[in-house]
Amino acid sequence: MSKYTEEELQKELETKEYEYGFYTDIESDTFPIGLNEDIVRAISKKKNEPQWMTDWRLEAFRVWSEMEEPEWANVHYTKPDFQAISYYSAPKQADPNKTMDDVDPELLEMYRKLGISIDEQKKLQGVAIDIVVDSVSVATTFKKTLAEKGIIFCPISEAIQEHPELVKKYMGTIVPTKDNFYAALNSAVFTDGSFCYIPKGVRCPMELSTYFRINQAGTGQFERTLLIADEGSYVSYLEGCTAPSRDENQLHAAVVELIAMDDAEIKYSTVQNWYPGNAEGKGGVFNFVTKRGLCEKGAKISWTQVETGSAVTWKYPSCILKGDYSIGEFYSIAVTNNHQQADTGTKMIHLGKNTRSTIISKGISAGKSQNSYRGLVQIASKAENARNFSQCDSLLMGNQCGAHTFPYIEVKNKSAQIEHEATTSKIGEDQIFYCNQRGIDTEKAIALIVNGFSKDVLNKLPMEFAVEAQKLLEISLEGSVG
Amino acid sequence: MELKDKLLSSFMVFEDRVNDESKNLHGIRNEAIKTFQEKGFPSKKDEDWKYTSLNALLKHDYSISPQQETAIEFKEVKKYFIHDIDTYKIVFIDGKYSSFLSETTHDGIDVCLMSAALSMPKYKIIIDSYYNKAAKADHSLTSLNTAFASEGAYIHIPKNKVVEKPIQIIHFSTGNETSLMLQPRNLIVVDENSHVQIIERHQSLTSNVVLTNSVTEIFANKRAIIDYYKIQNDNQDASLIDNTYISQKQSSHASVHTFSFGGKLVRNNLQFFQKGEHIDSTMKGITIIGDKQHVDHNTLVHHIEPNCESHQDYKGIFADRSTGVFNGKVVVEKEAQKTNAFQANNNILVDDKATINTKPQLEIFADDVKCSHGCTIGQLDKDALFYMRSRGIPKKEAKALLTYAFANNVLESVKINALKSRINKLIAQKLGVNLGFDL
């Protein structure tokens, strides 16, 4: 029987290297560093954007210049120098009209390393993917199959060209440019991202997926996702991210906007595995993301996230439950290790009657990391019979790390029913003893317990993604997930 | 003139007046007024004051140090005392000590006045080692109190004493001034193995505006037991900011029960610091308010050493346009292994215009701990109401019964029977029913 103890697991956790830390040598077209109106114009020009888009960006840039970086989050880091980042970096051969064969073989190799061979995905899993490297979309698969159903799934730069009416109508309605510092920055300089439109009553036949990767040094990634599910439609959307190991901090500031019209349903799953920095906390990605969804009548938005990477995470996928009978869900696993810091959670804004929301958040902290849950549940005075259930559990490994919860609950309607509970614990000696007693060795016992701890969330991931999420949890908690 | 400026300018006058009596505190007072000058009154921009605004209170032109003494007859105010049991009493009228209504002692224990303790040499050792030692020096309202502190209750229980009679601390305001600001300061030191029960109450006798900014420091030495009860049932022109700091040593037990039924705005800052092992800290509260009342409970338990426990249980019932705030914070330092921290906050909103904002917060740096918090917001169970009504209990009474049941957890742990039945009566009065029995 192996003598695998929690200490060993902890040690392994601390020493475990980042598996996706390779850097692929592909020629990139990168802008000089710095940010000013000219750069914003240049990005817009590079993307061959119409005038309204350029104006929109410039407006955002002006707003951003006057904003101050927020400091309220429970994270500590050296603020990025926004003038030392290149705001545009594209793999040179990227061409929106290419076929699979045109893709740089080195890129393909990169994806193979990432475990997402495009061919393989295409054939075996039936997942349509849009891959974004250094903020530029390099490959979108299954476009034709989707087009038959009337589904638009393409890079947002393409959508700006081909479906300007949709983009113009919806972009910035959920996350306005003025929303916050990073949203404004993103609005000014975003270079690509995914756009998706599901027409009325269509059930998207396959999972849609975006894969993000920061490759080039000294660049920031700013992508923007806009997802519109028209009345009665359904879509499940997956998002994954990685970055090479680098000593300096890279910045990732994304904006995701979801719109679920009447009776539509959006399931948005993220596996975030940006480079977390080395064991001493050097390098790593700053992940400052604004994600928000709007639910019309009877609509449902479900956020599922597995957060294992990034040096600093600052992310609150939110639901605005505007329509009556709408539903918001948030399932999250956040694993922090070494010097990682995560301040993540959700906002559920109940505006409509009979709206429901569920929040399940699991935080696992190891090493010297800090893991915070910060959530808001707000019941407006007109939101009759709103219902919320929140549960935030934290698991601590060692006494160098910290777990924090900051739940805000604001209720203005008497018929609301709110339950919130949070617990903090470690893997109990008695739990392991119980397993040992029944012939389960310690390694398996820890695996069982951690798996059980995060099961509620893992269960919510789509099949295709669950495999990858498991793999990522293994990276962070190898030997503990059975 | 803004209240802040007024306070700052009257500090000089105040300092001149009290300096003869308590020279040794000159430094503490000046330090404190500087902090207040820097920080000013807290605003909604401060995270701790996000849901409570003092703006409306600060508009009044408060009289800061009333000179006039007023006498009141015992029979007029009898109902505000727990009079059916024998107690020590320390009574203040408009911030001035009333020897007529009080019943103090120096027989083995010291139950007397802060002003005496601050000026008389025989208390110097205690004052030097405890006064202003638990209060947070960087907290603006506490600093404001420290700067102006001259009167309040001083209680010192030496080693191995069980104080037989509860001690009542009552502050009356008579309304001779149209608006009055009071800043009482209490110090309670309980030495090893001693036990004391204290009941505190603020009561305004007229409808003139009163703002009380009170600071209480409590020190529980090894194995001491302290039960502290706060009754907040003032009229709706009186507001209270209560800052209570409790510093506990090894194996001590301290509990604070807060019953908030009255007042225009009540803010309770309650902070426990556990400086030893095997400490037990309990804080419980029942809040039943209506109209436009606002009650804010802000609690902090700081677990510094291992093997300690803390229990929090706050119940709130909010009617009309009232607002309730609960902000409970538990901090567990990394040395504080085997901590057991429990926090619950349950709320019922009775009317559509009532609001509750709650933020139960955990900050945990140790791994071998059991910390949990639970928070609910809901209504009285419709099925239970129907059950009782179908058995002939009128709606109002049925509701009251359920409310009692809801609050009972907290009431049960009140150790003074006379106080328990008094609070029962207050709840019944607040709910407008007579159940004809005590729970």
Image (spheres, rainbow, N blue to C red):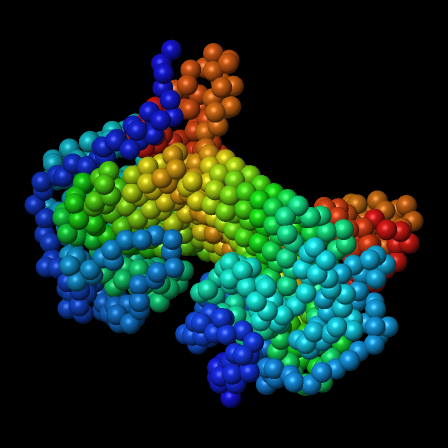
Q: In the picture, residue B114 is in which quadrant?
A: bottom right
Q: In the picture, residue B113 is in which quadrant?
A: bottom right
Q: Which of B297 and B85 is in front in this view?
A: B85
**Is residue B189 visible in this depiction of the protein?**
yes
Q: Is residue A354 left or right of residue B170?
A: left
Q: In the image, what residue occupies the spot 56% across and 59% down?
A: B126
In the displayed structure, B214 sits above or below A129; it is below
Q: In the image, what residue occupies the spot 78% across and 73% down?
A: B100
In the displayed structure, A18 sits above or below B284; it is above
Q: In the image, what residue occupies the spot 66% across and 75% down?
A: B95
Q: Which residue lies furthest to the front in this view?
A: B122
Q: Residue B214: x and y, percent?
A: 60, 68
Q: Nearer the viewer, residue A361 or B43?
A: B43
Q: Residue A169: x and y, percent?
A: 37, 63
Q: Residue A42: x and y, percent?
A: 14, 64
Q: Is residue A176 left or right of residue B55?
A: left
**Is residue A291 visible in this depiction of the protein?**
no
Q: Which of A73 and A140 is in front in this view?
A: A73
Q: In this view, does B141 lie to the left or right of A99?
A: right
Q: In the picture, residue B169 is in which quadrant?
A: bottom right
Q: Residue A383: x and y, percent?
A: 60, 59
In the displayed structure, A306 sits above or below A288; it is above
Q: In the image, what residue occupies the spot 83% across and 69% down?
A: B78
Q: Nearer the viewer, residue B250 or B214?
A: B250
Count of numbered labels shown in the rendering = 0
Q: In this view, does A178 lie to the left or right of B196?
A: left
